[in-house]
Image (spheres, rainbow, N blue to C red):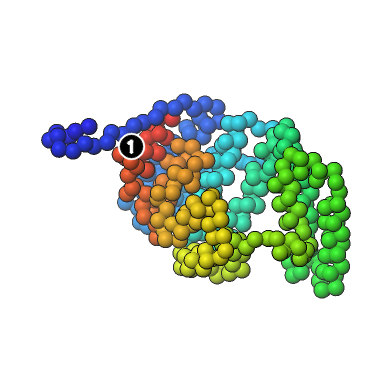
Amino acid sequence: MPDDLGKQRIPASRVQVGLVSGERKRVVMDSLALYTELRLTLQGASRQQAREARMQYTSQITTLLPAPARIAHVDEALLELMSERVVWELLCICVGPSAEDGSLAEGLSTWLRTNQAALHCWVKGGGGSDSVTEAQVALVEPCLLLIRRMPHLGQDASISSVPQFVSRRQQWQGAVLGFTQSKAAWDVCRQADPATARGLGMLLNLLLGSSDAIGQATSTWLEQLVARMLYMYPGLRLQGELSALMEQCTQAQDALGCAGWTSTLQLLQAACEGICTPWWPGAARPLGTGSMAHVMDVAGPAPLRPIPPATHTAHTGTTLVESYTAQYASS
């Protein structure tokens, strides 16, 4: 609308009013006091005080969201909140103290262990109510069990010598070969989801050391990046060395071999340079407006990153934090 002088047009803000109920309403109402308290605490707080307040705040918000549980049946609303908790914890790791001190890989490992139930495909399958997912589960479950039982020299306390390791590995290889040659589960999965069956078969053959499988595995920039990060952990500094490592890995073949990888590469490069603001809405799409309002308070002042409130959104004329806060308040 024009201002008093009629010289320019200022985009008007919009507030989308939505209704919440049930478990989500409980989360919104219970988080309101914490949200208000943090905003008051941050006013005039020192950097250390603000850091401690945000750490406490992130853990408090986590406790409000439903904890992941391995159950056969969950309703859609509860599953959405469980998913929000998983994504919330992941975002807090990426912008929290672990990202500052270089221990990001350790935080991600802990996140994976604590949320393995919510990430489990059995939750997605609703206890096997979907035939395609049921076929996937019937094949994925034994594969995961075999991978967990794969012997490791130096990491398994029950293996004290190389001959003992060789013996245990031969036993494990026999179990894997026996599973790969069992037709029932594989045939069902091939009919329901050929890509899953093919991928799992290649994975097991790679672990067995099959030369054919190793030759078929394509080395991409993403595979190289993950492998080299794991090799360099924990010495790799997120901001200090990741950008140079990204540049090296993207020189690999098929650097942009998939349309989806283009956006992945752009997001990773933006993270390396500390310019993540334009990517927040897409990266945090699984989160609701309430959680996004909290994310802006946690992520905004993260070191080496521009503050999100400085960026205006074209369709509302407001900053990101204003937009998410308004939607949170309206709910």
- Left or right of residue 107, residue 161 in this image: right
For the C terminus, the quadrant is top left
Q: Where's residue 112, x and y in %? A: 63, 52
Which residue corresponds to the image point at 48% horizontal and 34% vertical from the top-left?
Answer: 28
Question: Is residue 230 at all visible to an observer of this figure?
Answer: no
Question: Is residue 110 at all visible to an observer of this figure?
Answer: yes
Residue 109 higher or lower than 66, as above or below: below
Which residue corresponds to the image point at 61% horizontal and 68% vertical from the top-left?
Answer: 231
- Left or right of residue 256, residue 37 in this image: left
- Left or right of residue 109, residue 188 in this image: right
Q: Residue furthest left?
A: 5
101 or 198: which is nearer to us? 198
Which residue corresponds to the image point at 40% horizontal and 39% vertical from the top-left?
Answer: 324
Residue 79 higher or lower than 17, as above or below: below
Which residue corresponds to the image point at 42% horizontal and 35% vertical from the top-left?
Answer: 328
272 or 123: which is nearer to us? 272
Marks counted in the figure total 1
Helix, strand or loop status at disc 1: loop
Pointer 1 local density, CA inside 10 Å: few below 14, some 14–19, many at least 20 = some
85 or 253: which is nearer to us? 253
Residue 266 higher or lower than 28, as above or below: below
134 or 76: which is nearer to us? 134
- Amino acid type indicated by mark 1: Thr
- Left or right of residue 122, residue 279 in this image: left
Q: Where's residue 127, x and y in %? A: 73, 35
For the N terminus, the quadrant is top left
User: What residue is disc 1 on?
Assistant: 316
Q: Quadrant of residue 49?
A: bottom left
Q: Where's residue 150, x and y in %? A: 78, 60
